[in-house]
Image (cartoon, rainbow, N blue to C red):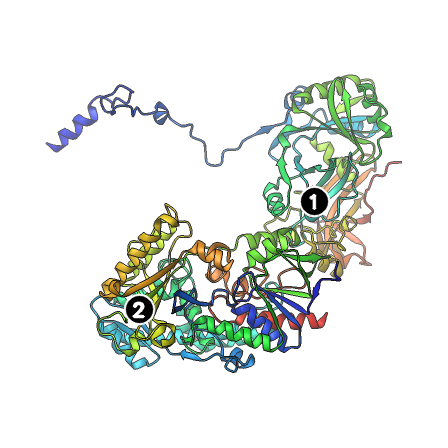
Amino acid sequence: MTERQGDQTLSGDTIDVSRDSPLNGAGIAPDPAWFEQSVVEPPFACHVLTTPLHLDAASESKTNSWTDWAGYTVADIYTSVEQEYDALRTRAGLSDISPLVKYRVSGRESVPFLDRLLTRTVGALDTDRAARAVLCAGDGNIITQGMLFRLADEEFRLVVRSSHLDWLEQSALGFAVQVEDVSGTIAGLSLAGPSAAKVLTSAGMEKPEALSKGQAVWVQLGGMPVYVSRTGMLGGMEYELWSDPSDASVLWRRLLDVGHRQGVKPVGAAVRDIARLENGVALEGVDYLSTFTALDSADSRTPYDLSLGGLVDLERTVFNGQKALSVIAEKGSARVLVGLELDLADGAPIGSVCTGERRIGQVKSHAWSQSLQCVVALAVIDASALGASDGFSVETGSGARRPVKLAKRPFLRFS
Amino acid sequence: MSEDALRYDAIVIGAGHNGLVSAGYLAKAGKSVVVLDAAELVGGAARTAEISPDYQVSTAAHLVSSFPRRIEKDLKLSKHGLSWATKDMATVALDRDGKHITLSSGRKNDQLTIAAHVTRDGDAWKQFDARMRKYVKLLAPLLEGPMPEMGSEVPAKLANMMALRLEKLGPADLRTFLQLMPSSIAALLDRNFEGDLIKGALSLDATLGHHTGPHTPGTAFSLVYKRALEAMGQGVGYPIGGTGALTEALATSAEAAGVRIRLESPVIQIIIEDGRTRGVQLEDGTVFEAPFVMSSADPKTTCLGLVGARHFEAPVATHLRRIRMNGTTAKVNLALEGLPTFENFTDKEYGGRLLIAPDMGTVERSFTAAKRGELTLEPVMELVIPSYHDPRLAPMGHHVMSIVLPNMPYAVDGGWEAQRDTLMKRVIDTLREYAPDISHKIIAGELLTPPELEDSYGVSGGHWHQGNMSFDQLLAFRPAPGMANYKGSVDGLYLCGAGSHPGGGLSGLPGKFAAETALATEKTK
């Protein structure tokens, strides 16, 4: 009996949920949205982000080879490594650097805030100037690094490789300062190579070569306001152009068009990586990990480990990491980053760094440098082994050892 | 600038018991010291005041349980007017039917009174109490001095002593101790006892003033820690003249040693120059200068308010900001026409520390209510009748009653203005269940809510202990990780309040240890 009753209810009409249904009292009609099926999202859904230049990059790409940069999809190789490298080092290369994280720091106490946040003071930085910025955690290890632009007296832009808004907000406690993540509102283009200045001139900028290193200026390129800075990490003559995302595509197109005669070519992430290695720049996430990402603290580095001691000013009022860094400065680094040059034409994968029989470190990144005709590599080794008399060698994938020599960074020098 | 500034060897902020103990020790070491306090009277949370004319009571803290004999002797407090009304109060778990459990230091009797409820609990108590004493001994060395700095090398002596003590416990006791550490007091008591009343009373003891309930993990350790702190003292009691008499004796002793106590002098800023304290500034602009500053204000107020977050590295400021200070204690003080009649009460009970917590469920419900911002229907409480041992607090034959009410929300639904009377009514209704004639005897009464305690004593969050005393905020983590050595992260700043190790309660130990640390540190400079 009860069973049948149950059946009846089940097979009966579906419940009327409409506004006029007698089930609903006066005035309490259910919102139809309650009954709509929500879009089910897999728990670890991967959101692919694209930069404002994605479609332009796609139209330039002959290889359809993409890579991930901080969650953004960017072109890895447009045509071929050789062609792009050739363009970058002998003419000019244009690349998309929009995935960089940008923070706007503004307010009455921006300067004291940044003084406490960064390893050196910013008060002396002039407007429209950029300086390298290193953020350290309480243990003295690097959180991230990048460039700090002074846009106005009380307005700065911090451009870094990874996102740390939480840390910035924690650091802002007690300061009359505003910190905003403006990454999405600024597109970035990098124009590098011997002809970069000429390309900019053709694009409508007056005297780009007059811009000194670290200097920046607002210019109009084809009617678009663009903030051009003489910054970058690829070495040589290089500019970074910061614009509104909606202008970015036009700007990109314009630079390729007017620079056609100078031979400007789009350059993908692969060649950018080779170039920064030649320039001897250690990259977060590759050569070392942000102390907030490192599972093992041995993977994170202090500024001293990366020979960035010059960017740390210990003798001043408190800043993040000061206590730990003072101790480290006195004791010296335990593990340091060094440049290695190998005479290894085939560029075989390389692992441990050894002196004699002793393993003293690990190669972190390496690449074949066409300009230097050798393999350049960055490795982290024990500081105590630096003066080793036996010379250094690296293990290749097959277990064989090849001699290497320590090299000064940057590997590639520009006149 | 500094011409008309006032110069001392040390500045102490706050004239509460810890501030005064610090000042006393500094003066004893030959320093010229000034103590600055915003209030009109010394004492901080240990102050005696009138409920109504002629009825005096310890306004906030009403018991002294962990004040060491050492400090009393060092600062010659008895010479300066300190004498104890009682030092061995019994703890009485009140029973509605008059079958109270009276715990005093006589172990045999304790066992009997517990066994009168549930026979098996008598033996259980014997074992439980013995084990507790062992744990207290184990913890003792940690409370006898400053904690070693986290990350630095633990002094070999302390490490060895702890290792030895753990070893000496033996495998069985060690296991139960390790099991106890993360346990809730409810779990611990359920493992040991059957009787509701004993469990209610002990769970109230473990959670009193900590914004935790019997089922909160870590509360078993709170009971051990509370007992360990009490072991540093001279027994549960209060001085003649209430807890205010203790701080007055401290003040007199300090002044006799040359300390200047300047009241009605609210400090608004600790001046930092080149990463070091230079002095303090008062609200009216007066500047006091000294090579170092001791603050007995709570760590948040001191570091983030008076010094400013910018003078700390961001992680330190974040740690400070995250100190949990949920003040959930209220205080009711009553002036009574005569002694209320409790069934089966003898001299010992009237002069004891009375606990109203019929079972753990009631204690837990009061905590749950506080969490939700509600007033509990059945308040639990710790009450004493100070005039019983110290008749001068009230006119002849009359009495005062001092009641600590835990688990009262800082921000109550409907606001405290609207809820005061409800709470007062519930407190008196609850009391009537034990002493039916109490409502006829009340002449006057006062209620201090957590926000009022915050206002009166300047403790952010209104927390009596200047920060929850749970395992994550004790020992090396008090007041914050990396700051357990009383040094406030800024050179020349020392934290000497209850927010520092070993914590709250009228012990004076943070004040003493901070002064010793400051003297040792500043000497080497």
> SS for tag 1?
helix
How far apart are the two marked residues, 1 and 2, measured between alpha carbons? Answer: 57 Å
Q: Which amino acid is tagged 1?
A: Leu
Residue B104 placement (x, y as % from top left): 33, 77
- Residue A26 appears in which quarter of the rendering? top left
- Residue B175 appears in which quarter of the rendering? bottom left
Mark 1 against mark 2, which lies toward the viewer? 1
Residue A235 placement (x, y as % from top left): 80, 36
Q: Residue at x 81, y 34 (%)?
A: A215
Q: Does the image show residue A346? A: no
Q: Which residue is mark 1?
A: A114
Q: Which residue is mark 2?
A: B192
Give left or right: position of B64 versus A277. Answer: left
Circle 1 residues within 10 Å: few <14, some 14–19, many ≥20? many
Q: Which amino acid is tagged 2?
A: Asn
Give left or right: position of A177 versus B434. Answer: right
Rendered-image quadrant of the N terminus of chain A: top left
Along the line of sight, which residue is nearer the eye, B323 or A98? B323
Q: Does the image show residue A308? A: yes
Give left or right: position of B307 versus B454. Answer: right
> SS for tag 2?
helix
